Image (tube, rainbow, N blue to C red):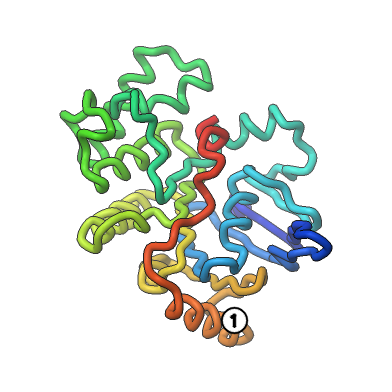
Amino acid sequence: MGEPVISMEGLAKRYPMGEETVHALENVDFAVQKGEFVAIVGPSGSGKSTLMNIIGLLDMPDDGTYWLNGLNVADLADNALADLRNRTIGFVFQSFNLLDSLTALENVRLPLSYRGTRLREADALARRYLEKVGLGGREGHLPHQLSGGQQQRVAIARALVGSPSILLADEPTGALDSRTSTEIMELFEDLHREGQTVVLITHNPSLAARAERTASIADGRLQEEDDPSSKTAAGEATRQIALQPQGLAGKGGRRATDANR
């Protein structure tokens, strides 16, 4: 087994809230190997969105160490972090985060524009990935002319167009009906079979079960599902999920502009 694409040790993240301190993440150890499909499942407030933001270089931990593709991210300046994020992470959010004024083709090629890719090459790549996700022939459609499932496919094509090491999906089916959700999950499974590394963040245990490996997060602590000590945390996470209304929006889309850069 080679070097993991994601390796975290002792990760912690805290936020001030009035006179209190919220411990969003506590002593998180987590690793993902190249080509794995890993799901992180937990209820709202469990810390999963904070972990997603750190994995995607949208936020930094207060303690611990995070290596991404063998690089210690704490050693990198802001511009180097932005470049690493653009070239390494492909983001898929619940809310799609497509630009309404741009066509499907223009939305997909957007990450390449930050790299300075020539327009002809960017167009060719965008067309290739729209075809890959089943949207060939819809390159000129605006987001409002597409269904929710089609918009999410555009978002997935945008995430893939830069050939990222990791596809990071935050509640990618939360705004979709059950049939379309199944289609999107089948697409992730197809990408995984082709060798794409996928990290799925979800509150839905049935979606998480489709991944190759699952970890549960509760109260800022992450446990692997095959770890006997994880049963209590996993059970509590599942219980809290059952008490929530379905389709709760995640927090991951709040920095969508950064995610595309």
Q: Residue at 44% x, 47% y: name it.
A: 93
- Which percent across, then down, holds residue 136? 19, 32
Please determine whether, in this image, residue 255 is positioned above or below residue 169: above
| Residue in front for this viewpoint, 35 or 108 | 108
Task: Find disc 1 in the rendering and name its residue.
Answer: 233
Q: Residue at 34% x, 29% y: name it.
A: 100
- Which percent across, then down, holds residue 260? 50, 33
| Residue in front for this viewpoint, 147 or 161 | 147
| Residue in front for this viewpoint, 70 or 122 | 122
Please determine whether, in this image, residue 182 is positioned above or below residue 98: below
Please determine whether, in this image, residue 196 is positioned above or below residue 48: above
| Residue in front for this viewpoint, 30 or 251 | 251
Residue ranking furthest to the left: 137
Answer with left or right where residue 212 lies relative to residue 50: left
Q: Residue at 29% x, 25% y: name it.
A: 103
Q: On the image, which quarter does residue 16 sit in?
A: bottom right
**Amino acid on which disc 1 is placed:** Ala
The quarter in which the N terminus is drawn is bottom right
Q: Residue at 47% x, 20% y: name it.
A: 113
Answer with left or right where residue 36 lies relative to residue 104: right
Q: On the image, which quarter does residue 74 sit in?
A: top right
- Which percent across, then down, holds residue 213? 47, 68
10 Å crowding of disc 1: few (<14), some (14-19), many (20+): many
> In what element is the residue under mark 1?
helix
The quarter in which the C terminus is drawn is top right
- Which percent across, then down, holds residue 35? 46, 53
